[in-house]
């Protein structure tokens, strides 16, 4: 099974991806926890380029870097892990590109969709947990512990557009994408909802 965590800055993706891995391992599954950008050796360099607030990138350069990261990630990490019977949990995947590059950067939908399909080699998640958050709350959370990265530095309107696109994706893909609003819920309550969603998915498979 391939599970992805999605959502705007500071929604709790990394926190919940880690907790879900622990839960699933406790059930006896082998789990690979990975992330985008930066799920491979080369990807870690690409992540550095993408997140460094000193770098000013053309939005096409940006999407090509994300596409290069994903191409490496899918072929060298995700597909081999799935083939060996592991559950793969990825902290961000294709919906991030759709939400950030169409919603946030306003790139043409057909271009972004083409690049997303080409770089993911048509590998779709079985389940996506969208952790929704209002931008004010998310950015506050994300920048409490560390200096803002290149995306966290974007203006509020950018984050609002990313969020809107995520919600639109969820609406169009309601059997794959399950949305939890995290504005007012604590981490444990959210994790318990995530576990219920995942267990329900297992029962259906
Ligand atoms: N529901 C919540 N309520 C309060 N704080 C939270 C909640 N979820 C996560 N946090 C805190 O917010 C911060 C950001 O969480 P986390 O790093 O998991 O988010 P993220 O979605 O991975 O962010 P990024 O997009 O920056 O990678 C952490 O300090 C985490 O403990
Ligand atoms: Mg994170």
Image: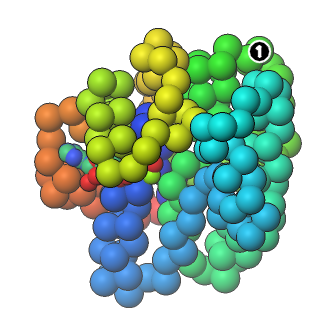
For residue 186, above or below residue 107: below
Q: Confirm whether residue 7 shows in the render.
A: no
On the image, the x and y values in percent for residue 171 come to: 45, 24
Count of all numbered marks drawn on residues in the image: 1
At horizontal 35% and vertical 25% (from top left) the residue drawn is: 135
On the image, the x and y values in percent for residue 53 come to: 60, 37
Judge by depth and name the residue closer to the eye, 69 or 80.
Answer: 69
Q: Confirm whether residue 107 shows in the render.
A: yes
At horizontal 66% and vertical 76% (from top left) the residue drawn is: 81
**Left or right of 90, for residue 77:** right
Local crowd size for mark 1, using a 10 Å CA cut-off: few (<14), some (14–19), many (≥20): few
Q: Quadrant of the N terminus?
A: bottom right
**Left or right of 77, for residue 13:** left
At horizontal 44% and vertical 82% (from top left) the residue drawn is: 29
On the image, the x and y values in percent for residue 174 come to: 45, 33
Judge by depth and name the residue closer to the eye, 105 or 178.
Answer: 105
Q: Secondary structure at mark 1?
A: loop
Judge by depth and name the residue closer to the eye, 28 or 119.
Answer: 119
Q: Which residue is under mark 1?
A: 108
The answer to whether mark 1 is within 8 Å of ligand 1 is no
The image quadrant that residue 74 belongs to is bottom right
The image quadrant that residue 32 belongs to is bottom right
Farthest front residue in view: 54
On the image, the x and y values in percent for residue 160 come to: 43, 17
The image quadrant that residue 133 belongs to is top left
At horizontal 67% and vertical 26% (from top left) the residue drawn is: 101
């Amino acid at each position: 099974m391939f599970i992805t965590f999605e959502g705007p800055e500071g929604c709790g993706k990394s926190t919940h991806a880690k907790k879900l891995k622990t839960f699933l391992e406790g059930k006896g599954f082998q789990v690979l926890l990975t992330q985008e950008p930066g799920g491979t050796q080369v990807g870690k360099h690409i992540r550095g380029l993408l997140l460094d607030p000193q770098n000013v990138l053309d939005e096409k350069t940006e999407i090509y870097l994300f596409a290069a990261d994903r191409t490496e990630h899918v072929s060298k990490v995700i597909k081999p892990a799935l083939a060996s019977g592991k559950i793969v949990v990825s902290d961000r995947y294709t919906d991030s590109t759709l939400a950030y590059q169409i919603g946030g950067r306003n790139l043409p939908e057909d271009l972004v969709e083409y690049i997303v399909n080409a770089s993911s080699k048509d590998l779709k998640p079985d389940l996506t947990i969208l952790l929704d958050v209002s931008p004010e709350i998310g950015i506050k959370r994300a920048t409490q512990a560390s200096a803002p990265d290149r995306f966290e530095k974007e203006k509020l309107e950018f984050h609002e557009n990313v969020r809107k696109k995520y919600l639109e994706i969820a609406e169009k893909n309601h059997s794959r994408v399950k949305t939890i609003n995290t504005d007012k819920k604590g981490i444990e309550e959210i994790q318990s909802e995530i576990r219920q969603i995942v267990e329900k998915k297992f029962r259906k498979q």
